[in-house]
Image (spheres, coloured by chain):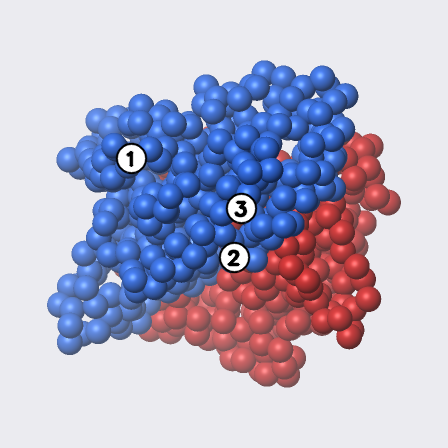
Chain colours: A blue, B red
């Protein structure tokens, strides 16, 4: 049976395989945590990127004050593995999902959730009342992404007031995610627009406090904006996730602030025509929603998918003198780390060319 | 614990959920099999689409003469579940993968594989010789896709001759996949170009036979071309997979020859601004490599992903009078069925609105 073990060389891995340079990952964690040390802003990393309890525990050990997950089913995996302080960052709607949350709360009372509508809040409250449970919630604000969230200002205040009659929901904060700003290349524009979004979030938090609501948490930010958010008065915590491994999309936007620590290892399986090599990694191994993955250490080489299980490498003879042969191993940097990790069941973590640990992607596919 | 059961209504499912209309799926199977009944061409469905042993057994019961898989790890899942006559349609390259194949052959001797290079064939033969095992192989030909495959004609003949000295490989056929023709919209152009590709494949098979090689299997075709291939003298089997469920990409190319039997069920979780609804299905629930999924039964509505876990529905007020509210359930037709199924762990199969069966996507993520 195929079962790689710590101590094995990378050459022992079948491909495609998702491999992590542990040292680079550790440096990314240390670099991020150092940036927030000495500030009053807490780091609550978003586990929708890593999808792994082992990595959640590493982040907590490095100073994270809790974690975010996107969905109830992700929270189930993480809570089961002992990650108790969880914020579920997507609205929980529909009877089956509300029931799952209530069942989870029975054992894990420190889970928090977000709401952005009276309908959604009321359904949660009714289910909690029946179960005799209480839930700390944050109102999600639309700070410009036009995805989820109630409008800042009056609409948020109105929702908070409607929630006063919901005895089993306790409003403790606000969330606003400026996802549309994460990948702006110009750092000045990114900072300016981020500050505008933070202004909407923090002034609404202040309005809520003035109206008597105990807003303790003002949570926001991703890998592209977390440091900018921290400089905005009133922000209490940030939610970066991708910094752990990075991807080409973030690297192109941010520069080398964090290292690209994860690649997909593939094998050249065919050389059908000149200047073209076929590798064993296609749509099912590398996501392409944010552009094309990049071959590592092969300047002048380009990747494109060729179906579910195949990828095509092409190159320019004038810029590249590398000759590929069947059996060569090629590592590729993902363009979008979250959706690429979601394709794989296992992290193969290595140091100095040897496998150091094997982590299951335990929350892979937990979309509910 | 969340555990839907047969007999539950669809409303009991948490979302996003991958749901299958069993009756439409059964009709697709019957329709395909009827088209090949009475011909000498066998149907060897490609399981890279369905990824499920339960569905493999249904296809075999309906008349399939064996199955295809793309990778050794898929073959492991299917062989373990009793699907013995398997053709692995991708070249097997690299020591770890060759070792996995040899281990699998110990218990499952009816597995067949493809080769397209002397290097690849030689590595297989060496490993088989050490294990004292034999393997039936097909040479893969490049019939125009420029993905894998040796050139038809002389190059194929040369590889076959090189393989004569490889005592543990037995050449029994040729494979050629015209993947680049599957989605041509004009049926006349698709048929004409497919016949040209089949000519390359069947004439090379004839050349091999003339040279003394016992070519029994000439395997080819997908959902878009299988019927055309069948009409080409010399083709012995076809490999369709997507016909089982279809997707919008195939439906747009082929018309309603098979029914769209699979959708992703989602929930409206937010209504942040006018003419925009947010559903709980993003990149992690619906693939977009072949275009945008389509909301079912909602003319004038359009889907676009809004990150890993969110999707945006927009609509034209002039063509649509439907009003969406938070909690509404929306089903979407995938644009690419293989990559969408690969995102999900479970099929929820229903008939007349009630769950009939729950099938694990046991070969999901088996990319190695």
On the image, the x and y values in percent for residue B252 come to 66, 71
Identify the chain of the residue marked 2, using the numbered disc in the image: A
Number of the label disc, if any, that sits on residue A145? 2
Residue under the point 36% across and 50% down: A225
Task: Name which quarter of the figure residue A20 lies in.
Answer: top left
* Tag shown at residue A329: none
Label 2, secondary structure: give it. Answer: loop
Query: Disc 1 or disc 2, which is closer to the eye?
Result: 1
Residue B289 horizontal/vertical position (percent)? 51, 62
- The C terminus of chain A, quarter of image: top right
- Does label 1 or label 3 sit earlier along the sequence? 1
| Rendered residue at 65%/49% (across/down) | A155
Subunit ID for the residue under disc 3:
A
Label 1: element kind? loop
Query: Residue A250 location, x and y as percent?
Result: 33, 55
Of residue A141 and residue A297, the one placed in the foreground of this image is A141
Question: Which of label 2 and label 3 is nearer to you?
Answer: 3
| Sequence-earlier tag: 1 or 2 | 1
- Left of A111 or right of it: where is B245? right
Q: Give me the C-alpha separation between circle 1 and circle 2.
A: 27 Å
Chain of the residue where label 1 is placed in the rendered structure: A
Q: Which mark is residue A39?
A: 1
Task: Answer few, some or many: residues within 10 Å of disc 2's Cα (few below 14, many 20 plus, some between 14 and 19).
Answer: some
- Residue A204 lies, with reference to residue A124, above or below; the image says below
Residue A204, numbered circle: 3
């Amino acid at each position: 049976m195929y079962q790689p073990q710590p101590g094995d060389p990378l050459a022992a891995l079948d491909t495609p395989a998702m491999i992590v340079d542990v040292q680079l990952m550790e440096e990314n964690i240390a670099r991020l945590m150092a940036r927030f040390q000495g500030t009053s802003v807490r780091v609550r990393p978003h586990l929708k990127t890593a999808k792994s309890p082992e990595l959640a525990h590493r982040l907590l050990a490095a100073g994270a004050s809790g974690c975010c997950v996107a969905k109830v089913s992700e929270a189930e995996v993480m809570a089961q593995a002992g990650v108790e302080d969880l914020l579920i960052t997507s609205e929980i709607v529909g009877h089956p999902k509300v029931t799952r949350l209530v069942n989870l709360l029975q054992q894990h009372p420190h889970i928090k959730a977000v709401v952005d509508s009276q309908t959604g809040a009321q359904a949660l409250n009714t289910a909690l009342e029946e179960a005799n449970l209480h839930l700390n919630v944050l109102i999600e604000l639309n700070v410009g992404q036009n995805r989820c969230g109630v409008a800042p200002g009056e609409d948020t205040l109105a929702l908070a007031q409607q929630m006063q009659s919901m005895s089993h929901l306790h409003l403790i904060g606000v969330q606003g995610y400026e996802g549309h700003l994460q990948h702006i290349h110009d750092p000045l524009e990114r900072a300016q627009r981020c500050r505008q979004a933070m202004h909407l979030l923090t002034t609404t938090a202040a309005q809520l406090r003035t109206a008597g609501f105990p807003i303790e948490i003002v949570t926001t930010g991703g890998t592209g904006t977390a440091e900018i958010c921290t400089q905005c008065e009133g922000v209490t915590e940030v939610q970066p996730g991708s910094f752990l491994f990075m991807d080409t999309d973030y690297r192109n936007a941010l520069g080398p602030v964090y290292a690209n620590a994860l690649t997909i290892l593939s094998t050249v399986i065919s050389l059908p025509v000149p200047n073209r090599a076929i590798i064993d990694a296609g749509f099912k191994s590398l996501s392409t929603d944010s552009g094309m993955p990049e071959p590592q250490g092969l300047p002048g080489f380009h990747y494109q998918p060729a179906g579910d299980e195949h990828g095509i490498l092409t190159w320019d003879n004038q810029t590249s003198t590398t000759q590929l042969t069947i059996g060569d191993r090629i590592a590729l940097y993902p363009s979008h780390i979250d959706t690429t990790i979601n394709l794989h069941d296992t992290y193969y973590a290595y140091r100095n060319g040897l496998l150091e640990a094997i982590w299951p992607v335990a929350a892979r596919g937990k979309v509910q």
